[in-house]
Image (tube, grey):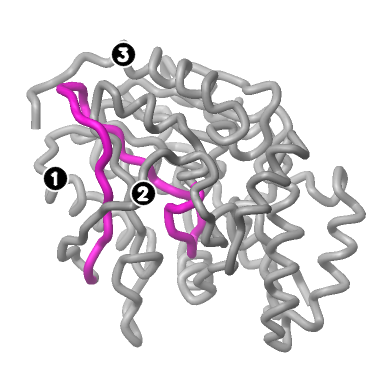
C-alpha cells in the first residue's frame, strides 16, 4: 500500500501504484464543536454552477470583505471556527465562510458530476458575484491557499489582497510534510491501522484521522483542547480523489510573479504538514509580498495564536485601500 497525503494533515490510504498527490490539511476532516467560536452557525445557500453553495457572513463595515477558503480538499469550513481571530477581523469588514462544492452544507456531488480545480474556481467566483463584490480579499488555509492562488491567477481583477496561511505549495504534488521525521511513533500507529482502514473499518478510519490531526499542533494543550471537541470525523474521499487527480497537473509557480496585489504569506514555525520553506519560497516569488512566522504554531496559527494572528492580519488588511462599498 502507498500512503498519500489527502488533506491538511490527513494521510489517505492509496492502493494505486503511484503516489497520487500531496494534499495538505486534515483539520476539517472533523465536525468540531466550536471550541473558541463566539457565534453559532447561521448561514444560507445560493445556486452555484454545480449545485447549492453554503456560506455564512459575519461582521459588517465598509472595508473590502474577506473570504475564507478552507483546507482539504474534501472538507467543510468548520475547523475555522476553532479560532476567535475571525470575530476580531469582522469588526471592520464582512468575513465570509463557505463550504466548497460537495462538502458540508453545500449540495453533495451528483453521480458523474465533475469536481476539478476549474470547478472550484468557478464556484468561488459565483460566490463573489452572488455577494455583489467587485473585489474581495482571499485568505486561504492549506489546500485553500492553492485554490486562492489559482483563483487569483484567473481573476486578478477581483482580488484586492491575498493571505496564504500554511498554504500548499504552488506545485501540488511536491511532497512537503515532515511528520515521519518528527512524529515517528504516530506514523507507526497510523501504519498499523492501514489494513483495517483499507477494509473500510470506520473505527479504524476515525482513529487514523485523529492520529493524523494530532500532528498539526505546536502546543499539546491546544491540540488536546481541540481534539476534545471532535465528534464524528468527516471527510469526503470522493472529492479528495477527484481533485487530487486534477491538481497533480498543475504548477502555479509561473503565476506567482504576475501577482500585483498586496500579499501576506503566513506559516507556523512548527508546521510539519507544509514545511515553512514552502511559505518562504512563495513569499520570495510574489512581488512585494510580506512574510510572517508564528513561532508557537503548527499548521493552524489562527487557532494556536489567535490574538497575534488577528493583529497581524488586521495590520495587513488596514493598509489595503477600500474600494466602493458592495
- Measure how far apart labels 3 and 2 are at the Cα level: 27 Å
Camera sees residue 252: no
| Helix, strand or loop for disc 2 | loop
Q: Residue at x 35, y 25 (%)?
A: 89
Q: Which residue is drawn at 30% across and 33% down?
A: 66
Q: Is residue 264 magenta?
A: no
Q: Does the magenta stretch include residue 66?
A: yes
What is the crowding at mark 2: few (fewer than 14 residues within 10 Å), some, or many (at least 20)? few
Is residue 255 shown above or below 212?
above
120 vs 286, nearest the viewer: 120
- Measure how far apart labels 3 and 1 are at the Cα level: 21 Å
What is the crowding at mark 3: few (fewer than 14 residues within 10 Å), some, or many (at least 20)? few
- Measure how far apart labels 1 and 2 are at the Cα level: 21 Å
What are the residue bounds of the magenta stretch?
51-79
Mark identifier at residue 40: 2
50 vs 118, nearest the viewer: 50
| Helix, strand or loop for disc 3 | helix
In the rendered structure, the answer to whether residue 22 lies left or right of residue 145 reads: right
| Marker count (numbered) | 3
Is residue 247 shown above or below 183?
below
Q: Residue at x 78, y 83 (%)?
A: 196
Looking at the rendered image, the quarter that the N terminus falls into is bottom right
Mark identifier at residue 131: 1
Where does the image place residue 95, in percent across and percent down from the top left?
29, 36
Amino acid at each position: 500500500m502507498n500512503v498519500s497525503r489527502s488533506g491538511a494533515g490527513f494521510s489517505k490510504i492509496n492502493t494505486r501504484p503511484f503516489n497520487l498527490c500531496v494534499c495538505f490539511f486534515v483539520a476539517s476532516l472533523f465536525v468540531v464543536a466550536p471550541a473558541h467560536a463566539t457565534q453559532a452557525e447561521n448561514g444560507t445557500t445560493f445556486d452555484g454552477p454545480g449545485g447549492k453553495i453554503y456560506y455564512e457572513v459575519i461582521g459588517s463595515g465598509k472595508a473590502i470583505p474577506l473570504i475564507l477558503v478552507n483546507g482539504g480538499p474534501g472538507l467543510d469550513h468548520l475547523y475555522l471556527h476553532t479560532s476567535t481571530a475571525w470575530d476580531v477581523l469582522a469588526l471592520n469588514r464582512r468575513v465570509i465562510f463557505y463550504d466548497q462544492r460537495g462538502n458540508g452544507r453545500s449540495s453533495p456531488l451528483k453521480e458523474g458530476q465533475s469536481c476539478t480545480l476549474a470547478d472550484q474556481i468557478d464556484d468561488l467566483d459565483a460566490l463573489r458575484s452572488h455577494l455583489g463584490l467587485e473585489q474581495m480579499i482571499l485568505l486561504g488555509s492549506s489546500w485553500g491557499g492553492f485554490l486562492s492562488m489559482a483563483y487569483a491567477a484567473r481573476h486578478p481583477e477581483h482580488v484586492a489582497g491575498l493571505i496564504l496561511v500554511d498554504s500548499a505549495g504552488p506545485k501540488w504534488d511536491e511532497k512537503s510534510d515532515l511528520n515521519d521525521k518528527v512524529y515517528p511513533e504516530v506514523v507507526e500507529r497510523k501504519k498499523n491501522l492501514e489494513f483495517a482502514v483499507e477494509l473500510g473499518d470506520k473505527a479504524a478510519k476515525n482513529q487514523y484521522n485523529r492520529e493524523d490531526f494530532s500532528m498539526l499542533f505546536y502546543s499539546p494543550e491546544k491540540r488536546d483542547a481541540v481534539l476534545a471537541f471532535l465528534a464524528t470525523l468527516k471527510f469526503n474521499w470522493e472529492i479528495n480523489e477527484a481533485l487530487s487527480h486534477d491538481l497533480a497537473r498543475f504548477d502555479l509557480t509561473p503565476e506567482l510573479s504576475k501577482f500585483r496585489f498586496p500579499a501576506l504569506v503566513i506559516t507556523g514555525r512548527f508546521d510539519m504538514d507544509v514545511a515553512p520553506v514552502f511559505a518562504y519560497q512563495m513569499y520570495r516569488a510574489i512581488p512585494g509580498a510580506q512574510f510572517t512566522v508564528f513561532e508557537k504554531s503548527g499548521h493552524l496559527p489562527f487557532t494556536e495564536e489567535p490574538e497575534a494572528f488577528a493583529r497581524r492580519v488586521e495590520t495587513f488588511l488596514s493598509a489595503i485601500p477600500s474600494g466602493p462599498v458592495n
